Image (spheres, rainbow, N blue to C red):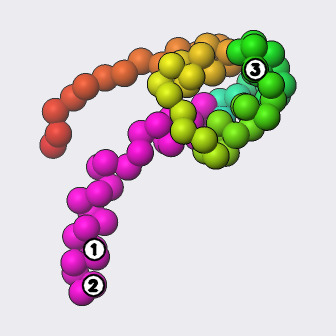
Amino acid sequence: MYRQVELEHAMSAPFADPLTELTRDLVRLRHNRGLTQREVAAYLGRDAAFVCRLEKLQREVTVRELQAYAHAIGFRIVMVISPLG
């Protein structure tokens, strides 16, 4: 049984939710820039609660929302497609 669980974990690792990882990276970058959730929210035309829920992964997030968030903190998102292996 252990081997089966190990194999399932190894196979699922490459398919970890990229939007979750990206969101966590963006939050880290916001902190590094010294920006508050309110400042980001004001840029986005949203309230701070929206940014808080987005950052805590308490809501589904779209690529478009993450692109806007990245722009608000002075970055842009670049997507790359590469072969496996």
| Residue 40 makes an appearance in the image | yes
- How many residues crowd mark 3 within 10 Å: few (<14), some (14–19), many (20+)? few
Q: Are marks 3 and 1 in contact (CB under 8 Å)?
A: no
When asked about the image quadrant of residue 11, the answer is bottom left
Up-down relation of residue 23 to residue 47 (above or below): below
* In this view, the mark in front (2 or 3): 3
- How many residues crowd mark 1 within 10 Å: few (<14), some (14–19), many (20+)? few
Prevailing SS of the magenta stretch: helix
**Dot 1 corresponds to which residue?**
6
**Dot 3 corresponds to which residue?**
46
Percent x, y of residue 21: 49, 42
User: Which residue corresponds to the image point at 24% horizontal and 87% vertical from the top-left?
Assistant: 1
Q: Are marks 1 and 2 in contact (CB under 8 Å)?
A: yes
Real-space Cα distance between discs 1 and 2? 6 Å
Which quarter of the image is occupied by the C terminus? top left
Magenta-drawn segment: 1-26
User: Which is nearer the N-term, disc 2 or disc 3?
Assistant: 2
**Dot 2 corresponds to which residue?**
2
| Residue 9 painted magenta | yes
Real-space Cα distance between discs 3 and 1? 42 Å
Percent x, y of residue 73: 68, 18
